[in-house]
Image (cartoon, rainbow, N blue to C red):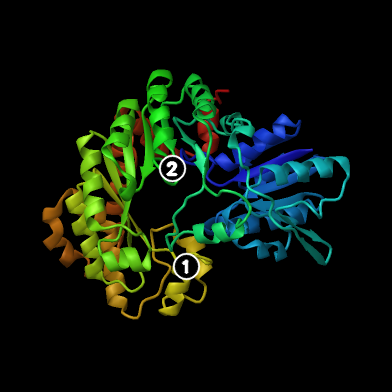
């Protein structure tokens, strides 16, 4: 019995999946093997060839769901004995994907114990149709099982199986993505949190965190394996002050690597920011999202004021921590001038880098309903989301095509205008031009500078950016032959 995990763009530095690592670690603890492979037909076929019992497992986001389904259909047509299961965000909120050809099961919500039960049952020849969290196809019948309670104590899970990914790439990742907890208490309209809260209503606390001891065990392994930067990807890293005050001195004394984290303006305090700075925090990312308070608090439901955002930015800057802001343009009900207000608020906050995305109204979110009510959805919104690249192109339609075009052009110039605000008069002229390659090049240049040279220490971000360009320019087979894998 083996579980095969196809991963798109596996060589990319940010292609790390804590969910897969957690499930694989639990499976390994019970004697079941996992393997990560590139999400190509050739790689998956090589992995499943000759296997007596193979589970093909996809961790699926909405934007990649079509690619995963297409790959799965191609594999299962040639290897009908392969059992395929889809987990992750997309099947959690759209379990009806079980009806797609070639899909044998979908996992809703937390996947560790459902996957363990599935693999154990198949290896022992037992029925799999009544496993909680799984919808299972059995001929023409679909067994729709309810979700089980949330894992109350995350410390009961083994440490993530990072060797799974280290063995699948040509060279180890320079940085590591780490999750210290699960869940978010907020309900921003562009996020699925409100759906997740409803799904698990009465099933336990949605917001949970591993103990500092448990996190430190994982971090020590990463440090010993040569990791040079930690990226904490919890939705709001500073949500628990007591946890932060216990974590910070221990991280400083026991780990000492630079790290980054995500914060929320209304929770930023000088005490927590200073503690994290002393621990080694290099960068904090904070959502501004919209400069218009009505858009931010009514349409997006961020529930924070301009004053809170500006104050949080000041606290972070004064502590000597680099600040990256997240912004959303092209919001339903907004205008180009509203997006210009977002730029103006960023200029008051003075971030080191201002990232910007065009709003993506994912099905199932509240913003999707708002956009639909306003007439902004295209006929095949999901198709647009799957092929447009997250936040790079708008999947919404606008009645004023000229305004829409200018917003998309403005988006490409946004980070540069935060760095060089004196270019605003020129930008107001340039955004009137038709979309062109120059705008894309400016955006990608600022994205790479912000993502690698600002968001990471130079000694870490520089090599990451270099490796990215090497991957783009040199085919994988040539890189593999020129630089043998380091186990």
Q: Residues within 10 Å of mark 1 (few under 14, many from 20)?
A: many
Cα–Cα gap, marks 1 and 2 = 37 Å
Q: Answer few, some or many: residues within 10 Å of disc 2's Cα (few below 14, many 20 plus, some between 14 and 19).
A: few
Residue at 81% in and 55% down: 129
**Residue in the picture at 42% in, 32% down:** 230
Percent coordinates x, y for residue 229 in the rendering: 40, 30
Residue 130: percent from the left, percent from the top?
A: 80, 54
Helix, strand or loop under label 1: helix
The one of 261 and 138 positioned closer to us in this rendering: 261
The first of marks 1 and 2 along the sequence is: 1
Residue at 51% over, 29% down: 215
Q: How many marks?
A: 2
- Camera sees residue 448: no
State the quadrant of the C terminus: top right
- Determine which quarter of the picture holds residue 76: bottom right
320 to the left or right of 423: right
Seen as rendered, the residue at the extreme right is 125
From the image, tell me which residue sits under label 2.
472
Relative side of 334 to 50, left or right: left
The residue wearing badge 1 is: 366
What residue do we see at 53% from left, 27% from top? 218
Residue sitting nearer the eye, 472 or 248: 248
Q: As rendered, which of 164 and 323 lies closer to the eye?
A: 323
Screen quadrant of the N terminus: top right
**Compared with residue 144, is residue 169 higher up or lower down, i.e. above or below?**
above
Does residue 284 sit above or below 435 in this rendering? above
- State if disc 2 and disc 1 touch (CB < 8 Å): no
Q: Which mark is residue 181?
A: none
Mark 1 vs mark 2, foreground winner is: 1
Q: Give whichever of 199, 9 is nearer the camera.
A: 199
Q: Position of residue 183 (x, y in %)?
A: 51, 48
């Amino acid at each position: 019995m083996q579980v095969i995990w196809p991963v798109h763009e596996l060589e990319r530095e940010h292609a790390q999946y804590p969910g897969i690592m957690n499930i694989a670690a639990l499976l390994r603890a019970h004697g079941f093997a996992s393997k990560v492979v590139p999400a190509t037909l050739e790689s998956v076929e090589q992995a499943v060839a000759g296997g007596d019992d193979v589970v093909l497992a996809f961790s699926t986001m909405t934007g990649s769901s079509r690619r995963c389904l297409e790959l799965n259909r191609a594999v299962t047509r040639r290897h009908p004995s392969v059992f395929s299961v889809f987990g992750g965000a997309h099947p959690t909120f759209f379990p009806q994907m079980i009806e797609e050809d070639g899909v044998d099961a979908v996992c809703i919500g937390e996947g560790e114990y459902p996957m363990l039960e599935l693999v154990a049952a198949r290896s022992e020849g037992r029925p799999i149709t009544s496993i909680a969290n799984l919808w299972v196809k059995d001929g023409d019948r679909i067994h729709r099982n309810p979700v089980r309670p949330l894992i109350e104590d995350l410390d009961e899970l083994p440490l993530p199986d990072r060797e799974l990914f280290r063995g699948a790439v040509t060279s180890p990742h320079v940085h590591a993505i780490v999750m210290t907890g699960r869940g978010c208490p907020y309900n921003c309209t562009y996020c699925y949190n409100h759906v997740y809260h409803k799904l698990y209503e009465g099933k336990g606390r949605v917001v949970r965190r591993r103990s500092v001891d448990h996190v430190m065990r994982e971090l020590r392994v990463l440090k010993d394996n040569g990791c040079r930067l930690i990226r904490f990807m919890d939705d709001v890293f500073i949500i628990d002050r007591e946890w932060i005050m216990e974590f910070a001195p221990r991280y400083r004394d026991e780990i000492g690597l630079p790290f980054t984290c995500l914060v929320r303006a209304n929770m930023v305090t000088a005490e927590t920011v200073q503690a994290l700075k002393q621990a080694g925090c290099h960068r904090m990312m904070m959502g501004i999202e919209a400069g218009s308070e009505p858009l931010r608090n009514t349409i997006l439901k961020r529930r924070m004021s301009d004053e809170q955002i500006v104050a949080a930015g000041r606290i972070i800057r004064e502590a000597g921590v680099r600040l990256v802001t997240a912004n959303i343009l092209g919001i339903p009900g907004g205008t180009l001038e509203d997006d210009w207000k977002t730029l103006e608020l960023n200029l008051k906050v003075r971030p080191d880098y201002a990232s910007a995305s065009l709003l993506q109204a994912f099905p199932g979110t509240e913003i999707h309903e708002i956009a639909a009510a306003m007439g902004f959805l295209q006929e095949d919104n999901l198709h647009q989301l799957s092929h447009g690249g997250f936040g790079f192109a708008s999947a919404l339609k606008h009645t004023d095509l000229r305004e829409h075009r200018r917003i998309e052009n403005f988006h490409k110039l946004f980070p540069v205008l935060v760095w060089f605000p004196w270019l605003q008069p020129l930008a107001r002229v340039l955004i009137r031009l038709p979309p062109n390659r120059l705008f894309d090049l400016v955006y990608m240049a600022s994205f790479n500078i912000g993502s690698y040279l600002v968001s990471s220490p130079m000694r870490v971000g520089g090599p990451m950016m270099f490796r990215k360009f090497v991957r783009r320019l040199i085919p994988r087979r040539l890189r593999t032959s020129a630089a043998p894998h380091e186990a």
